[in-house]
Amino acid sequence: MSEAEKILKKILSDEKLLSSRAFSSKVYHDEPILRRASQLRPPDVPQKIKDMKAIAFSPEAYWKTNAWLFYTQGKFMEDFTLESDISAQAELSYPVYRDMETPQLISYFSWRTKIRRGEYVHTCDTFTELYFNELINDIGTSSPEDSQQKMNDFLRNYQFSDQRDTTFLRRLKTDHAIYSGLDSSFIADSIEIQTDNAAVVLICPEVHTDEELFDAICRLSVYDIRRSRFYAADSSYAERIVCSVFRSLTEHFRQNRKRSLFENLFGKISECSYHIFFGAVHFDRGVSSDREYIASPVRKYVLSHGKWSCIKYRTDSRCSALGDLIRSIDAAAREITGYQFKLRSPSITRDVMKFTQDAVSEIEKEKAAAKARSITIDVSALQAIRNNSDITREKLIVEEEEEMPVPAPVQEISAPEREDDDFPLSGGEISFLEAVLEGKDWKSAASAAGSMPSLLTDSINEKLYDLFSDTVLGQDGDTPFVIEDYTDDIRHLIQERRLL
């Protein structure tokens, strides 16, 4: 027995010590109470990590930028691999090696080794951002194209907790392609290019199909007509009307206005500053000569005197002006077709009403023509019909007519009275809505309607959505209430119902 073990044994056998507060008030599990100095030694640190950390204290690092230090350390460690059981997390806004503790570095390089093997193990956001910082600096890759491929593989295979977490990483991937001057096909899946493609369709709608035009409108419009009750009733009918009116308005603006319909909705193409690799750590390795990058027919990135700018339309977010136009087309179509659920829209212009009327008339004409073409007569079958008729007549002729029983008269059953189809709410829903509005006994109103308050709330919100484009009833716990902005409208709506 060693001297250290003898000392430990003597201490742990002392009854006076064991009965003291330091021992008697604690609960111990299966682990040594006292440890040797060798057991307290921190885990071994690979020499490569030690050498990498030492770079931060070199004379050159004192006057170089943080981006230079990250790139230099990253290139030093780009081929490093590590197998370790240490699992240390990190939370850094701008992850770099210098700001990470040794256990975190060991854990990161072990995780990166698995990623490069194709094992996409879930980890903290700091490690994923640090990995992308390496890729946008072409650390651990053979070329910019290889960096793009590794970013694609990671975005496709890694299991993110929330897909919204990929927005930042996808932007870094796009910026890397722009900075490296890669072909625009490398950024074809980016959100910016997808909205640009929709903008191109809206600029020249006459050369695109209804499906392409309608998808582009839905991508860029604040008002989503696909949630409209009119669209749900006959989606193909509504889609044709929207596309026809939009094409007619586009042509009308070309012939009669100084600005096109697209420019009237989205404004003119303009130049704005662009912060490439914003939020990331990127070292400019001398690729700073003035140049242009054509990302799409309506988007261009320009590097001039070391500063980036972007020339584009305002298509990075949904357009409220386009939403107002589509909503007005929806409202006009309901008015012209006599749809029972009306939609209020103050922006219905004479042009919108006229072109909507033309679209509806054209569609109805096509339906009538198609129906007329579907009626065909087989003249060759007429003689066979006559022959069969003669045979039937001979069989019906009898010498004496038999008395046929007279069927008993059928009592007419009157149809139950229906509520006014033009009003979206039932009587029970109106009573419940009025009780909530006036602070009366809404529970009794719900019971009288034969339903639950929560179900009535959902039903009223759904039926009035087309009128308000929003929910009119909210719930504070189990208590329903009318949203303050719509109090006067709801009261006016109930009064109109009483006058019907």
Image (cartoon, rainbow, N blue to C red):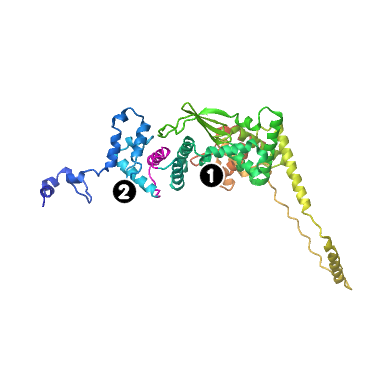
User: Residue 456 at what x, y percent from top left?
Assistant: 57, 44
User: Residue 71 at what x, y percent from top left?
Assistant: 37, 35
Q: Secondary structure at mark 1?
A: helix
Residue 77 can be seen, yes or no: yes
Q: In this rendering, which labeled residue sits more in front, label 1 or label 2?
A: 2
Which residue, given by chain and number where applicable, does mark 1 sit on?
454
Task: Name the residue at 73% across, 44% down.
Answer: 363
User: Residue 100 at what x, y percent from top left?
Assistant: 32, 37
* Residue 134 located within the stretch drawn in magenta: yes
Question: Which range of residues does the magenta coloring cover?
Answer: 118-140
Side (left or right) of 258 relative to 75: right
Amino acid type indicated by mark 2: Glu
Residue 472 can be seen, yes or no: no
Closer to the N terminus: mark 1 or mark 2?
Answer: 2
Q: Which quadrant of the figure contains the C terminus?
A: top right
Which residue, given by chain and number where applicable, does mark 2 sit on?
83
Spot the residue most to the top: 305
Spot the residue most to the bottom: 399
Amino acid type indicated by mark 1: Ser
Q: Which mark is residue 401?
A: none
Q: CA distance from mark 1 to mark 2?
A: 55 Å
